[in-house]
């Protein structure tokens, strides 16, 4: 998602400044949901995907960050991964289309897709509104099973503080 | 290979003569090595002499995937007649598939005497799904494709469309600009008012490491009314689809020569990136052996990609709460009895190109209501819809009485029409002889089919060996001398025979 996040900034300075503002204290969407609940940890990639690891260390939920969703502009279609597919970190697990652009969604860590959010096919706009909401009706992409390699991959990802700094720095570079 | 000596900017680099591949080195190795060298350069310019849309898009994808992440690339190509839909579009809704299968009049050669298009031989049209987003376009030798691949940090939706605008202005095309949809439009004074026409459309593909912007440019394409016919599906009022709909625009040709356009865009690209470098011409033998291109080509040609990638959609006979539009049944088949319009019901949901839910009502089923519903599901669920003849699937479910058969034929005519397939060849058996016009058409079609005894092979031949018309590539232009040397390096002296063999292998695999 990195590519999209960057690309729109040059074209849309307003979206750019909005993104900086939003990455300040309010990281959360309109709806209430927890990103630092005691039983799960949310980690982010440089490509603007997130993953929640559940307390069992075996399952999780993936999605794209609010920052990326803002930069994408109006999302008109979400291509979801196949259920049961096993992918390595960085492999494409779907794509979103906005403003004539097909942008890949990549696996934040090595994982297996166990459930997809079919609601996004019907309402792709939810991905713009609630990208980091992992509840029913939210913009999460898929529920996943985390592989052993996946747990190792996870260590290299950013926590929400580090990601906040990262996006602020990325925005400044443009 | 002393490619280093050809570095642009070195005095005398133009003087070098083309270097032949020593026969002792295997062709494959030289080709691969030479590709790698090209793909690592910071600025690269390619021009394809191939007109196969699947292959050109696969070369483009190869450049996207395999070029060095910091490089910036210009790639220019022209396709033979093809309808190209966006990644997340529905071909049944966007394209008149029956018309597409009949082809378009072959383009007039400049040397040919004038004559009405009716008697012109017809050329097939390919249906292509590209990997980028956006809407449906028609390509032919008069519609240029330009593509710029760059690092994501440098990506901007307009800057390369602006580059093409500068190229058009350099060619004295007036009134061109980039609009808010990132397309190039032309403002023209007509009948005392300013009218705006689209001359170029943009689409993008963004990956983790690279971004790709490609666009068309209408130089001298088929008349817009003909294009519009191809891009208007009679099934559209029956289809409710997820995914992306095309936005219709009035289009216009800028009337620029292909070669002049190519050179002007290359010039602007060179200026933009301050790189006075030669361009590389790609031909069939340069690409047909590259594994990644072969795989991309196979994927683009597969039914699973062309039809299976279609976002889920529903076809329904009657207006529904979610889709209350009126349904013009007669636009899809010759005739449907008025009684049937109100007594029939059908609703199919199609996912990944195959039927997912099936409901048919109003036919004279043999079984009870519940059993018939089940039988319909069993007959249709998981069946791919493209090239599906519905009649043989319906016949086992219904009574074989004249009125019942008539209903079945009319329903299957409609369903075959929705998915762009021809009326069932079986219909005659159940409806009696056709009328004279229908028979004449059928005979003509049979004769045409007989004239091309092996369609599969013909397709293979068309893939790469077909020369691009009147496209001299001698590089007369100021900066082009290097192009010859460069292209020679990639190009090998392959016989037509060898190319054909390669292709046959490729096609066989892709089936």
Image (spheres, coloured by chain):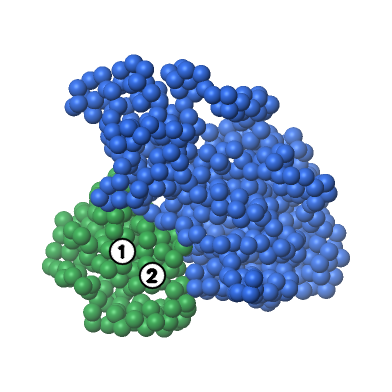
Chain colours: A green, B blue
Q: Disc 1: which chain? A: A
Residue B304 visible in this rendered orientation of the protein: no
At which x and y percent is residue A23? 29, 79
Residue extending furthest left? A38
User: In the visual, does A101 lie left or right of B273?
Assistant: left
User: In the visual, does B313 lie left or right of A51?
Assistant: right
Mark 1: few/some/many CA within 10 Å (<14, 14-19, 20+): some
In the image, what residue occupies the spot 18% across and 27% down?
Answer: B370
For mark 2, what is the residue?
Answer: A73
Q: Disc 2: which chain? A: A
Residue B431 visible in this rendered orientation of the protein: yes
What numbered label is drawn on residue B188?
A: none
Q: In this view, does A62 lie above or below B8?
A: above
Residue extending furthest front? B338
At which x and y percent is residue B408? 36, 25
For mark 1, what is the residue?
Answer: A125
In the image, what residue occupies the spot 58% across and 55% down?
Answer: B60
Residue B372 image-quadrant placement: top left
User: In the visual, does B178 lie left or right of B107?
Assistant: left
Q: In this view, does B48 lie above or below B396?
A: below
At which x and y percent is residue B210? 50, 64
In the image, what residue occupies the spot 76% across and 38% down?
Answer: B496
Residue A52 image-quadrant placement: bottom left
Question: SS class of the residue under badge 2?
Answer: loop
| Relative depth, front residue between A41 and B165 | B165
User: In the visual, does A135 lie left or right of B168?
Assistant: left
């Amino acid at each position: 998602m990195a590519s999209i996040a960057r690309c729109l900034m040059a074209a849309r300075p307003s979206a750019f400044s909005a993104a900086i503002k939003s990455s300040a204290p309010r990281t959360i969407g309109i709806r209430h949901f927890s990103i630092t609940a005691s039983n799960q940890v949310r980690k982010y990639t440089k490509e603007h995907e997130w993953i929640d690891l559940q307390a069992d260390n075996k399952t999780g939920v993936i999605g794209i960050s609010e920052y990326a969703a803002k930069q994408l502009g109006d999302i008109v279609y979400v291509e979801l991964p196949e259920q049961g597919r096993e992918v390595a970190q960085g492999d494409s697990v779907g794509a979103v289309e906005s403003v004539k652009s097909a942008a890949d969604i990549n696996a934040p860590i090595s994982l297996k897709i166990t459930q997809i959010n079919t609601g996004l096919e019907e309402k792709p706009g939810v991905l713009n509104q609630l990208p980091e909401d992992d509840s029913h009706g939210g913009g999460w992409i898929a529920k996943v099973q985390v592989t052993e390699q996946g747990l190792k991959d996870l260590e290299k990802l950013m926590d929400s503080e580090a990601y906040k700094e990262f996006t602020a720095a990325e925005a400044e570079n443009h | 290979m002393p490619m280093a000596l050809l570095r642009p900017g070195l005095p005398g680099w133009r003087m070098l003569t083309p270097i032949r591949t020593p026969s002792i080195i295997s062709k494959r190795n030289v080709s691969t090595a030479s590709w790698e060298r090209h793909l690592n350069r910071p600025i690269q310019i390619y021009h394809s002499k191939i007109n196969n849309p699947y292959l050109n898009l696969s070369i483009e994808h190869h450049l996207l995937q395999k070029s060095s992440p910091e490089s910036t690339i210009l790639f220019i190509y022209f396709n033979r007649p093809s309808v190209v839909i966006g990644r997340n579009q529905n071909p049944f809704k966007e394209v008149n598939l029956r018309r597409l299968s009949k082809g378009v009049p072959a383009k007039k050669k400049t040397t040919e005497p004038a004559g009405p298009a009716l008697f012109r031989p017809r050329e097939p049209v390919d249906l292509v799904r590209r990997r980028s987003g956006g809407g449906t376009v028609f390509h032919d030798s008069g519609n240029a494709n330009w593509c710029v691949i760059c690092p994501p940090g440098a990506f901007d939706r307009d800057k390369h469309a602006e580059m093409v605008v500068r190229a058009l202005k350099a060619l004295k095309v007036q009134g061109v600009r980039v609009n808010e949809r990132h397309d190039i439009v032309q403002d023209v004074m007509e009948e005392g008012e300013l009218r705006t026409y689209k001359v170029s459309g943009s689409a993008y593909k963004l990956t983790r490491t690279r971004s790709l912007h490609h666009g068309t440019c209408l130089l001298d394409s088929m008349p817009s009314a003909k294009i519009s016919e191809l891009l208007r599906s009679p099934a559209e009022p029956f289809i409710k689809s997820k995914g992306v709909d095309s936005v219709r625009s009035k289009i216009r040709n800028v009337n620029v020569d292909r070669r002049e356009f190519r050179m002007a865009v290359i010039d602007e690209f060179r200026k933009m990136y301050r790189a006075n470098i030669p361009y590389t011409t790609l031909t069939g033998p340069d690409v047909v052996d590259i594994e990644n291109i072969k795989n991309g080509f196979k994927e683009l040609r597969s039914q699973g990609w062309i039809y299976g990638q279609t976002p889920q959609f529903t076809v329904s006979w009657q207006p529904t709460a979610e889709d209350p539009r009126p349904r013009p049944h007669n636009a899809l088949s010759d005739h449907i009895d008025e009684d049937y319009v109100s007594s029939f019901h059908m609703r199919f949901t199609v996912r990944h190109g195959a039927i997912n839910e099936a409901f048919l009502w109003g036919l004279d089923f043999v079984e009870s209501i519940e059993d018939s519903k089940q039988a319909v599901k069993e007959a249709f669920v998981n069946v791919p819809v493209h090239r599906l003849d519905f009649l043989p699937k319906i016949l086992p479910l219904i009574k074989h009485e004249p009125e019942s058969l008539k209903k079945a034929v009319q329903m299957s005519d409609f369903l075959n029409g929705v998915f762009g397939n021809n009326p069932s060849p079986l219909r005659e058996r159940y409806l009696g002889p056709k009328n004279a016009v229908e028979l004449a058409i059928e005979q003509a079609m049979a004769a045409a089919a007989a004239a091309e005894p092996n369609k599969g092979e013909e397709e293979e031949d068309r893939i790469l060996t077909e020369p691009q018309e009147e496209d001299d590539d001698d590089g007369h232009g100021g900066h082009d001398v290097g192009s010859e040397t460069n292209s020679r390096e990639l190009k090998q002296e392959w016989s037509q025979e060898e190319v054909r063999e390669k292709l046959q292998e490729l096609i066989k695999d892709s089936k």
